[in-house]
Image (spheres, helix red, strand yellow):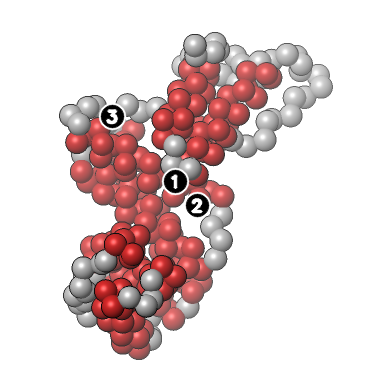
């Protein structure tokens, strides 16, 4: 069932992203559209549920959700939150992995931006079902950052630079690998692919810290600091020296 809403007033600006994602999935995946709009409603009610402009959006949205829930009552991805959560996460990961593959191949275009952006929004929708796992939280932040970064590069006529693989961020952000007592205490057997570089315990710990700082910076949308720390971690892993 199609939905035409009045333009969102400034007070409801944050829900526009969910509504846009819902519209894009209206035909090809009604389940995604339903949960995106439910998230928009829940978020909108917490922002502004009294102004006339906000109610002109929220009330029709509420009516649509009620009718659609009844119409799709036989669909477990709507009636069962566990099934719904899995459905949304699987779809978000498909978008994310496709965009990440294209990104690694240096195929930078609007479709990649859109896929990263949509996956980030769908990871957000998962908060409807409870707290996100650390892995999903990191995927969400990375997807949103990548979408914004590539979009801005394309807009400014610049070529996006691949800073660091996502898996490297996750792995480096984990607790340091314990050193076996029979091994050399001053070095870890960490060799970045193709570089021949071995990192000392202190260097590995420092690279981990840079990645943790980068992830923390994303929490505050501080992209310059994020990029700086990712570059420091990458340079240290590739060369075994500090980036000055």
CA gap, disc 1 and disc 2: 9 Å
CA gap, disc 2 and disc 3: 24 Å
Mark 3 lies on residue: 160
Quarter of image, res 227: top left
Q: Which mark is residue 136?
A: 2
**Residue at 81% over, 22% down:** 181
- Residue 229: horizontal and vertical position, in percent? 49, 26
Q: Which of 120 and 75 is in front in this view?
A: 120
Quarter of image, res 143: top left
- The answer to which of marks 1 and 3 sits earlier in the sequence is 1
Quarter of image, res 185: top right
Could you tell me if the residues under marks 1 and 2 are in contact, i.e. CB atoms within 8 Å?
A: no
**Residue at 25% over, 39% down:** 151
- Residue 214: horizontal and vertical position, in percent? 51, 33
Crowding at dot 3, Cα within 10 Å, few <14 / some 14-19 / many 20+, comes out as some
Could you tell me if the residues under marks 1 and 3 are in contact, i.e. CB atoms within 8 Å?
A: no
**Residue at 24% over, 70% down:** 26
**Residue at 33% over, 47% down:** 116
CA gap, disc 1 and disc 3: 18 Å
* Label 2: element kind: helix
Query: In the shown orientation, is residue 21 left or right of residue 205?
Result: left
Crowding at dot 2, Cα within 10 Å, few <14 / some 14-19 / many 20+, comes out as some
Mark 1 lies on residue: 141
Instruction: Locate the N terminus by quadrant.
Output: bottom left
Could you tell me if the residues under marks 2 and 3 are in contact, i.e. CB atoms within 8 Å?
A: no
Query: In the shown orientation, is residue 162 left or right of residue 225?
Result: left
Name above or below for residue 98 compared with residue 175.
Answer: below
- The answer to which of marks 1 and 2 sits earlier in the sequence is 2
- The answer to which of marks 2 and 3 sits earlier in the sequence is 2
């Amino acid at each position: 069932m199609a939905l035409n809403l009045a333009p969102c007033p400034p007070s409801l600006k944050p829900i526009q992203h969910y509504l846009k994602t819902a519209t894009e999935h209206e035909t090809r995946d009604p389940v995604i559209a339903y949960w995106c709009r439910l998230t928009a409603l829940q978020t909108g009610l917490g922002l502004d549920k009294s102004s006339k402009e906000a109610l002109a959006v929220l009330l029709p949205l509420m009516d649509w959700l009620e009718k659609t829930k009844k119409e799709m009552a036989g669909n477990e991805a709507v009636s069962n939150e566990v099934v719904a959560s899995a459905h949304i996460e699987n779809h978000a990961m498909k978008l994310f992995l496709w965009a990440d593959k294209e990104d690694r191949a240096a195929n930078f275009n609007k479709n990649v931006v859109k896929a990263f952006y949509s996956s980030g929004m769908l990871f957000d929708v998962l908060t409807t079902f409870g707290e996100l796992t650390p892995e999903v939280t990191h995927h969400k932040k990375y997807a949103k950052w990548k979408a914004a970064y590539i979009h801005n590069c394309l807009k400014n006529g610049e070529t996006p630079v691949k800073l660091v693989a996502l898996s490297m961020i996750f792995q480096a952000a984990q607790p340091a690998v314990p050193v076996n007592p029979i091994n050399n205490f001053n070095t870890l057997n960490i060799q970045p692919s193709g570089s021949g570089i071995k990192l000392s315990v202190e260097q590995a710990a420092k690279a981990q810290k840079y990645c943790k700082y980068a992830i923390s910076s994303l929490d505050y949308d501080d992209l310059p600091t994020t990029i700086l720390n990712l570059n420091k971690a990458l340079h240290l892993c590739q060369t075994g020296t500090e980036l000055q």
